[in-house]
Amino acid sequence: MVRRPSCVQALVVAVEALCCAIVLCCVLCCRGPSAVRSTERLRHAACWCLLCFLFSGSEPGYAKSREKFGGKAAVGGARDRDSGELRFSLRSLQKFLPWWRGEIFIVSPGQTPYWMNTSHPRVHIVNQDELYPPDDRQFLPTFNTNSLEQWLCNTPGLPESSTMFIHMNDDYLFTAPISPQDLFGPSCSGVRVLVENRAVRSVPEEDYLHQLETQSGRTWPLSVLHSIVSLDKHYNRERSVHPYLKHGPFIYFRQAMHDITTEMFREETIATSTHKFRSPEDVVRNASTAYAYLLACLLAHVSQVQVVSYL
């Protein structure tokens, strides 16, 4: 049985009570008694790096590689087609977040958009294989974004001073002005986590295994269920309820993400990395990592975690 400090236990209870709500989680990173001035927090928030995935199924080499490791059914179709979403995503970022001055890291399987100015000092192209530590590169190549997302904290070139970063997919578009508070909370020193108004309830592990045998075609919902079953098993809990995260920008605390992949869920991380394509036995961010993330913030000695909900 895992022993938890009372503060961690209280956080678990608080988070579970916020399902089907929009969660505003302000992780206050100041460690001393004095607060950092608002202008200083705004300056730091404006400099956090942006990490974005790019997978262009329109490139013949990429399609052939998928077919080599997964057969013709793994080649993909409209879902993998490149329609220029990343270009419009970055344009919307420039238009609606004019205050943001951070660096952009494009993580891809060796792909570089023809229209991108790679000489721009704020733009970096990173091969996705470089995210993995040496011991885990035996599982490459991978086409599994669930596996890739686990190692974003290892992105080469990410400044050591960047204790937090923004994660987006190439199909995220901003359609209205966004303020720093929209992403980092009122104090600009935390993270704002948006969840959907639907939730998934955990089941006993044997029930999940039964569904895995009888409903193997339901890759995404089963991977979500597997994630929360793994989380309950890790914290010795039963039948917890978890909201889905919104399909939108997510702010990660870098140290917490590192703790999740290398310590808290190391076995689950390795298991997910062995799957070259998405699997019903993956651990996915949308179900479990958000909660492990909050706990890891405490374990990483962040001074305070404040959770505020809006219906």
Image (cartoon, rainbow, N blue to C red):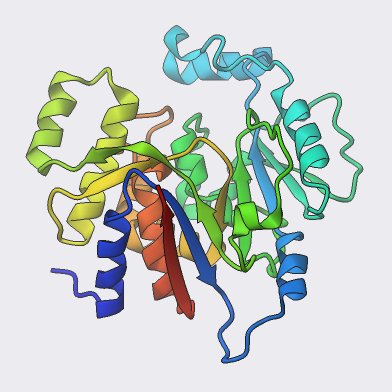
Measured as percent of width and height from the top left, residue 261 is found at 42, 56
Question: Does 68 sit left or right of 237 as displayed?
Answer: right
Depth check: give the residue in front, 190 or 152.
190
Q: Decide: is 32 above or below 223.
A: below
Measured as percent of width and height from the top left, residue 253 is found at 54, 62
Asked whether the viewer can see residue 238, the reply is yes
Asked whether the viewer can see residue 5, the reply is no
Specify the farthest residue to the bottom: 33
Residue at 59% across / 41% down in the picture? Answer: 129
Measured as percent of width and height from the top left, residue 227 is found at 29, 43
Question: Does 162 sit left or right of 299 as displayed?
Answer: right
Residue at 44% across / 71% down in the picture? Answer: 305
Specify the farthest residue to the front: 311
Residue at 50% across / 29% down in the picture? Answer: 143
Question: Does 303 sit left or right of 184 as displayed?
Answer: left
Where, by quadrant of the figure, is residue 301 drawn? bottom left
Residue at 51% across / 35% down in the picture? Answer: 247
The tally of labels here is: 0
Depth check: give the residue in front, 243 or 206.
243
